[in-house]
């Protein structure tokens, strides 16, 4: 009789122990902070980027090309960008402008909510017949001679040796000099971090072998990103064939690495 | 001739002492104020690059979604919407999966939101779009042309993942010729 009771209580004890252990282990799993996204499920989009260490990208020279003749103004890129960086409302790291040109050669530009909601309505306020319309996506020009870096008094905006212009949010004092210096109006003060912020061509994604978020989601391949050292890449081919004006405000001397295909006089 | 050269150097020593002290204080303050890796590669904090690299990725790619949704995968990749991003309509995968575990459900567009979403790309009236790239329609003419009720939603005829799938199936059943594209 004693032995049976002992057996039962032993069973109960182990049962309670196991349940408690399981609960603790389970809740620990929930509590442990969520780490980086599992890259194993995501195939490498830029080959040869994973497993590379060192502060800079050495073998590749990246260029960004926006093809205006392909852009349909859907705003996928803007949505992806907002999601990737959790950009506060009213601020835009990238946006899509709509250009409308009428018969009298007047140019009308609008960009409701940065193109984040797409373009649902045609413009009603244009008195003359419309001759031409097109969309122009804007993002950081990643200048070879960045004026924003030149003016930063605390070394918070810097240019890496692989030609990315990035922001160190821990150093930035939000003085706003860079915002005035940027000829392209790309920068803004992030009201949440209270530091300057701008498009980084998704440096963190590129270093992990992924395309920038906006390039990845573009349904019509209007945004292209690639390596100029690779002669088979699309960007190399585009930039090494005859083409018209391809950068914004070339007269500023900033030498942007962002190129446009089909760029129009009205935009430059 | 009397010698006018002074033998008293104490004022020079004092100035030198003050300058050296100021220099030392300057160096000490600089060392305290500047972050550790400042100036490693240029006039910036070297470890800022590492910080930027470690920014979390929030948008996976379509493959990160389709690996767990094989049925959608089959439809999506065969349809004409295969270049459309999952996360454009549903939101970033980081809001859905963390560390291989589902943490929340992503929203699904319903009702009029679907029409709004479709017309972001396919609305002919916007005009600013290249003619060759995608098919454009104008509402409600499209509904009239297809002889359906004017309050029909896009997803009643078009599967949002593979827009022509049901249309093609219906044509196969009826044996209808493909009309004008």
Image (cartoon, rainbow, N blue to C red):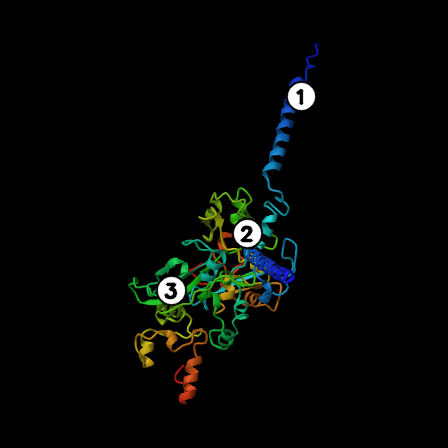
Q: Hey, which quadrant is residue A163 in on the image?
A: bottom right
Does residue A61 appear in the picture of this structure?
no
Q: Residue at x 41, y 69 (%)?
A: B121
> Which residue is nearer to you in this view: A129 or B132?
B132
Quarter occupied by the N terminus of chain B = top right
How packed mark 2 is, by other alpha carbons closer than 10 Å (few <14, some 14-19, many 20 or more), is: many
Tell me the element at label 1: helix
Residue A118 horizontal/vertical position (percent): 39, 64
User: Which residue is the site of mark 3?
Assistant: A119
> Which residue is nearer to you in this view: B33 or B68?
B68
User: Which residue is the site of mark 2?
Assistant: A166
Q: CA distance from mark 1 to mark 3?
A: 75 Å
How packed mark 1 is, by other alpha carbons closer than 10 Å (few <14, some 14-19, many 20 or more), is: few
Residue A132 horizontal/vertical position (percent): 37, 67
Q: Hey, which quadrant is residue B128 in on the image?
A: bottom left
Q: Are marks 1 and 3 on the same chain?
A: no
User: Which residue is the site of mark 1?
Assistant: B13
Quarter occupied by the C terminus of chain B = bottom left
> Which residue is nearer to you in this view: A77 or A150?
A77
Q: Is residue B116 left or right of residue B7?
A: left
Q: Nearer the viewer, mark 1 or mark 3?
A: 3
* Mark 2 or 3, nearer chain start: 3
Chain at numbered mark 2: A
Chain at numbered mark 1: B
Chain at numbered mark 3: A
Q: Is residue A19 left or right of residue A91?
A: right
Outermost top residue: B2
Q: Is residue A248 above or below residue A241?
A: above
Q: CA distance from mark 2 to mark 3?
A: 30 Å
Tell me the element at label 2: strand
């Amino acid at each position: 009789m004693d032995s049976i009771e002992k057996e039962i209580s032993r069973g109960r004890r182990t049962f309670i122990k196991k349940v408690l252990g399981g609960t603790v282990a389970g809740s620990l799993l929930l509590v442990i902070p969520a780490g980086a996204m599992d890259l194993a499920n995501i195939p490498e989009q830029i080959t040869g980027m994973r497993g590379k260490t060192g502060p800079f990208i050495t073998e590749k020279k990246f260029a960004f090309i926006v093809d205006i003749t392909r852009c349909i103004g859907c705003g996928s890129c803007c949505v992806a960008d907002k999601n990737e960086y959790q950009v506060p409302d009213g601020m835009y790291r990238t946006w899509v402008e709509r250009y409308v040109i009428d018969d009298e050669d007047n140019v009308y530009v609008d960009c409701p909510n940065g193109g984040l909601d797409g373009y649902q309505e045609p413009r009603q306020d244009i008195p003359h017949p419309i001759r031409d319309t097109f969309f122009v996506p804007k993002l950081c020009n990643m200048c070879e001679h960045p004026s924003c870096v030149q003016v930063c008094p605390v070394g918070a905006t810097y240019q890496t040796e692989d030609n990315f212009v990035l922001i160190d949010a821990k150093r930035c004092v939000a003085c706003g000099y860079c915002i005035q210096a940027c000829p392209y109006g790309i920068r803004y003060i992030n009201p949440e971090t209270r530091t300057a912020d701008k498009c980084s061509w998704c440096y963190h994604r590129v270093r992990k072998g992924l395309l920038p978020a906006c390039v990845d989601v573009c349904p019509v391949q209007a945004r292209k990103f690639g390596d100029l050292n690779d002669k088979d890449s699309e960007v190399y081919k585009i930039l090494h064939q005859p083409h018209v004006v391809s950068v914004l405000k070339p007269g500023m001397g900033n030498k942007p690495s962002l190129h446009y295909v089909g760029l129009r006089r009205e935009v430059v | 001739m009397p010698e006018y050269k002074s033998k008293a150097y104490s004022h020079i020593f004092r100035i030198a002492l003050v300058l050296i002290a100021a220099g030392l204080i300057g160096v000490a303050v600089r060392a305290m104020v500047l972050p550790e890796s400042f100036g490693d590669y240029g006039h910036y904090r070297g470890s800022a690059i590492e910080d930027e690299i470690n920014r979390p990725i929030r948008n996976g790619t379509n493959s990160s979604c389709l690996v767990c949704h094989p049925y959608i995968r089959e439809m999506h990749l065969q349809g004409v919407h295969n270049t459309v991003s999952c996360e454009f309509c549903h939101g970033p995968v980081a809001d859905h999966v963390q560390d291989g575990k589902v943490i929340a459900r992503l929203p699904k567009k319903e009702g009029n939101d679907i029409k709004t979403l479709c017309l972001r790309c396919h609305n002919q009236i916007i005009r600013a779009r290249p003619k060759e790239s995608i098919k454009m329609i104008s509402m409600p003419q499209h509904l009239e042309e297809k002889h359906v009720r004017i309050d029909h939603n896009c997803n009643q005829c078009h599967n949002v993942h593979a827009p022509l799938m049901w249309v093609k199936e219906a044509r196969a059943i009826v044996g209808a010729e493909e009309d004008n594209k």
